[in-house]
Image (tube, coloured by chain):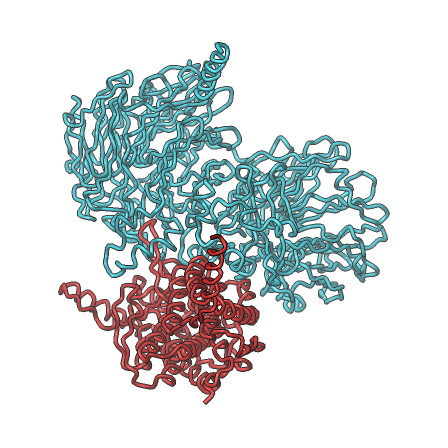
Chain colours: A red, B cyan
Amino acid sequence: MKLKISIIVALSLLFISCKKEASISVTTSDYCAAVDTVSAIMVHDIFSPPVASRIYVYPNIAAYEILAQNSAKYQSLQGQLKGLDSIPKLDPKSGVNQKLAALIAHMEVSKQLIFSEDALAKYRDSLYQKWGSENQKEFDVSKEYALKVVERIKKWMGKDNYKQTRTFSKYSVYANQLGRWQPTPPAYMDAVEPHWGEIRTLVADSASQFKPKAPYAFSTDKNSPFYKEAKETYDVGNMISKKLIAMENAKSDVVPEESVIATFWDCNPYATITQGHMMFAKKKNSPDAHWMNITKIACKKTNADFETAVFVYTKTSIGVFESIISCWNEKFRTNVVRPETYINQNIDPTWRPQLQTPPFPEYTSGHSVISNCSSVILTVIFGDNFAYVDDSEIPFGIPKRSFKSFKQAAAEASISRLYGGIHYRAAIDNGAEQGKNIGNYINNKLKMLKK
Amino acid sequence: MNNFFKILLLSLVFASCAKKQDQLFVKLPSEESGVTFKNDLDPSKNISILDYLYYYNGGGVALGDINNDGLVDIYFSSNQGKNKLYLNKGNNKYEDITQKAGVAGESDWKTGTIMADVNGDGYLDIYVCAVVGINGFEGHNELFINNKDNTFTESAAEYGLDLDNYSTSAAFFDFDGDGDLDMYLLNQAVHSEASFGNANIRNNRSFESGDKLFRNDNGKFVDISQQAGIFGGPNGYGLGIAISDFNLDGYPDIYICNDFHEDDYYYLNNGNGTFTESLKNHFGHTSRFSMGVDAADINHDGFPDLMTLDMLPENEKVLKSSLGDDNVQMLKLRTEKLGYHYQYTRNMLQINQAGNHFTETALLSGVAATDWSWSALFADYDQDGEQDIFVSNGIPKRPNDLDYVKYFSNEQIKSKINTTKLLDKQALKKMPKGNVTNYVFQGAADLQFKNRSSDWIENDSIISNGTGYADLDNDGDLDVVTNNLNSAASIYINLTNAKSNYLKLKLQFEGKNTFGIGTKVISYVKGVKQYKELQTTRGFQSSSEPIIHFGYGKTAIVDSLVVIWPDKTYQTLKQVKTNQMLIIKANANRKPFNYTRLHPTVLPVFKQVTNLGIDFIHQENHYVDFTAQKLIPYQRSDRGAATAVGDLNGDGKDDIFFGAASGRASEIYLQTTNGFAKKAYPTLEKDSIFEDASAVIGDFNQDKNNDLYVASGNGENAQNLQDRLYLGNQLTNAVLPVLRQNASVVKAFDYDGDGDLDLFIGNNSKFNRFGSAPDCYLLNNNKGKFSVVQNKTFEGIGMVTDAIFTDFNNDGKTDLIVVGEWMKPTFFANTKGLFKDVTESLLPEKCNGLWQSIIAFDVDQDGDQDYLIGNWGMNSKFKASQEFPMKMYYDDFDKNETFETIVAIEKGGNYFTTMGLDELTEEFSGMLKKKFNSYKSFAGKTLEEVFDPKMLESAKLYEVHNLKSGYLRNDKGKFTFVPFANKMQVAPITCFVKANFDADAKEEVFAAGNYFGVSPYHSRFDGFSGALIKSDKTIFLGNQVGIDLTQKAVRHLDIVNFKGKKYLLISINNKKIEIYELPTAKN
């Protein structure tokens, strides 16, 4: 009797192990979901746009490098991105599921970069459990390889000067130096990342390679270009306020287009609202996250396969990363005062912008640089006149919006900063130019497709 | 068995007895008293903290005998419900007569309430304030005139006091001395401004929010705010008012507490119907979110002191999860650019210095942190002769909880982002509670208060707002009544009873001011003065019983009572028996009172003179150390100006060298026949990049011409730290060894007896490495060439600030004492030109301090040399003792090639970082952001829980055991540290100078200090006016000897000889120098 049972058990075990296990399926949606999970954690943890760009780019590169192993279609970025080399080679016979390894690497690098590790670990572990139950062996070898790549990427990103810039000097406020940026209402936060221009670039030679035209010289003279620019921001703000008041008076719910645009592209990760002793935060995704989401929309719309999705995410996030280094370098080189400060001191002490002024110098507009760079990159991949519906802001209570092309979206994102009252026109125009230059440079310089 | 129970029973009895012994107040149960009033907020009215920023400010209490039956009655204002009047029936029984009396109140949102005899008929009337015109609140301020039959008639309109604006409270007092009561109406702004705006907004006038002063013109109250100089701006967040004759000129002055960034107002009464707002001239800094306030003389000098409340939590968990102070740069912007004064988030205790200025001592006195506090009431609750403080406390929801602000609020509002009601009740529920028990402090000698909250009162979680005191049960001691939010009002019955003696005075004055509001009573017992002023509006939104109450301990007879009436007349009562209630009627033949009698005589020591042609203004540059070294406890770069006095042009007269901050050239003023004239030197101009830390004039190359040695320091740049030597009349550059540390002091002396001047250079830190202890240098002079003497004894001494060449062991050889921060005064004995550290044998006690300065002086007049040493003082958030030293760890903790400091102080036996999570993560983001991803997870964690103990162990540890300034007493060659009294501990003492200041036969020492290079967390050490130290027993503060150095960070004191007279030269960081002529000795 006992023997019989043992035999049956042994046989059934044999059958189970003999059964050919299916390869673990990993889809574009899985990758997008992982990026979205990181985005949501970033909203909670509160990352500024510069730090957010870093959290997006390295996990994507890790994933991309795994896919580029032994690929006929995709070219490794080793030797193309500063300091990136020695990615552990993948033995084609190892049984590694490259898509699976790419996704694992994405999550593991992301986990290193965000603060709320528990939230990401929970998400990761549920997937690990699922994959382990689907095909333990494939999962194990894929994970083993992924972690090797992760280790290499961590070592590489550890040398991008991020750690050092944490300890660099804070921005110095000189109360009496006219024209120099100073903290803005209501929270009067310290300047964000004054040394981001010192972060290692990936593609560009240096942070100052795409230095834009100089901003107008600071002046309080009413005939100066600087004053006129500020006056334009002031006038546009007042025009929108008037329209909003008219809307309220008419009990209409048709919000003026300029206001809709400003709100849609606000992308302020941390706005604070003060009511008496009470303070609370209004959080949204960053401009970086907004463009990552547009990337997702484009991938989904074109039913992009897993490899294509990782390729697009990687290239776009490199663009965003490079844009912010270039932009921040300019911001803290010029230290231009924000319209809110200038207008309050020189035109109207009670004026408030439609959007909350973000805590860093004005020139150039980060959103303009990021959006135009991203649109140039996405246009090359998906073509011009790529119409899509942007639902990125729905989680933040803002309705979706349709666009005819990435370029149209980028142009709108740029001008939204004027409507929002947080930039002058030159920072928008010259920032857009700066972004396009960076995008074109990346398009020309980076060889990601073999053909 | 039987025995066991007996013992148990006995111990229980003892236990309860022991508890009762310390308990000073017992709450009267409402079932017993019949006082069931509750200030219930009505949820059905659909108003919350989101609609009205002062939704949780609660109601008031007015205490007084409305029917003149000798029993104090109680009136409560209710925000949304009905006000209540309780008639005192004796024996702690009260009857609710609201309905019959007609005083329930009609306004929708009622706030402060005051009892006063507004119409001067001898009966107390009741004034009730209201907020009208927002959130649909209707109504107006109401004035219930007493019909003398336990009923009242609302008559506000008749008197011109039916204001329908945003009132917090009011005070009735006779500001113009015309014999009737005028009124100050305290109003509040209700809209929070996103932007600070310029301080001059207060010059505008807003009907709704602006405060108002009303003059009583024969029963009609006329708004004279504008002509009287009262601000009525839209940014006056008025929450507290105190009336007192602060400068003792016979006219009542006004202190107004404003919430948020608007300054408090200090209105000095000009005596001609107008006031002059004078805050900045008299106060170094104030509370930021100023709420309740009270005035009383706490230190027996006969001048009313002041306490303002704020919302700094005491509890470490609450403290570290609540929004803290501004950062240093924003405070600079607000004060230097926008015109506001220095404000910090904590209670302030302002000690009145004879009406000249106030010295703030809340941290020294132990009353700085009482959490979300509303009312402060000074009174001698235990009747020991010292003023105690009762603080009412609590808020239902803490809106400044950092986790709520950063992490939870967003989840709640996400879906409602475009609606006007951003938060709903669900969201409010997530906000942490702030139910904190009331605090009570026992007054003690030497500016100290002892927290007796855990034994004098029962702790509870009730939220108390308006508070008043009165002798409700006529047993002579003062009872306390609080108006509670959503709970029954508390009546605290005082159990002092016969344990300690008292005197209770009721005043009967002439004319319309029947209760004698504004009367001062000064009591003298064996030379000890107690000063009281009858003002009933006190604390917060409330008025107390119109009596004067003194505590006397065991004293049976009061030597004399001087009663100064509001009309500047007085009468004196002598040999008054204690333990009685006295009714004092204004005497018909009372005499005019001369107020100068109350002002102390100022000793004519210091006489400020015009600057003798010296225009030097020290200008600090923009550099803020905290931008580069984010975790350091205080700055280093602001310790200029360096000065040196000596003959620089060979004419035998004193010239003066002034060092400058980096970016400006040093200046030299040469003495001429008429004064001093500036002379430019190309070599100095060329070296303007250096920041001069210390300088000395001497003939270093022995060519009979004096030379100048300047030590560079205050390092802002590694390249600019080389010391310089300038030779001869032209100050030509000379070669020096490489000396690139942050120097703090240079002293010249021929230590080796070879006839030339050698130098000691004390260094404080390496560039950008606060906490590194660099080597100090002994420079040997060899025919004008200096070389560093190799001596291990000077390596890594510590963060040196000052040094003195002195023969401390009486062996005829000049030795050296070095003092500094985070170190012990260090004694180096000179044996044949070789220095040896002999500290442990001469000064064995643990006495590391944040030492700033040292001077030799026989302070105890016993014939040997003692040393006065200046320390940080006790008026800061730093805390140190031998048992629990303050600690500073120094290392590159996160291995990123930058060195950090972590400072920790002890609380309840554990150590906590002085910095909060945001500050720590600015430097340690990698290490701490993941470990603590909420404030709650960080708050209350000990140092070892925050940082890996192993990491701390391998760091360099500095300790401080003592923060008090004092002196090293010489006992036959051994030294013991003796601290000065607390009046000398209000700020760092940074410099001393010895001279014969008062033209007697002996030399005295003058000490000065103050320091501002700390983060807003510490506030600002600005209250030290200087001190003339004649001996350990005789020390005069500046204002007693004709000098006021408050609000000035004094760096150097020098004596300059000019035309046969001696002058004191005072160098101040970032300010113009000051010069005082010294009295000439009568020989």
Query: Where on the picture, by quarter, is residue B498?
Result: top left
Residue at 77% x, 38% y: name it: B841
Q: Is residue B439 left or right of residue A146?
A: left
Instruction: Return the x and y of residue B725 as percentages of the image width and height.
Output: 72, 62
Instruction: Return the x and y of residue B1007 as percentages of the image width and height.
Output: 61, 42
Q: Residue at the far top: name it.
A: B2
Residue at 30% x, 23% y: name it: B29
* Residue situated in front as seen by the camera: B531 or A395: A395
The quarter in which the C terminus of chain B is drawn is top right
Residue at 35% x, 42% y: name it: B433
Q: Is residue B1034 left or right of residue B124?
A: right
Q: Residue at the far bottom: name it.
A: A451
Instruction: Return the x and y of residue A17 as percentages of the image width and height.
Output: 47, 66
Query: Where on the picture, by quarter, is residue B779?
Result: bottom right
* Residue situated in front as seen by the camera: A214 or B1012: A214
Query: Where on the picture, by quarter, is residue B67?
Result: top left
Q: Is residue B90 visible?
A: yes
* Residue situated in front as seen by the camera: B1048 or B234: B234
Q: Is residue B424 left or right of residue B632?
A: left
Instruction: Return the x and y of residue B49 as percentages of the image width and height.
Output: 28, 47
Residue at 84% x, 61% y: name it: B783
Q: Residue at the far front: name it.
A: A1
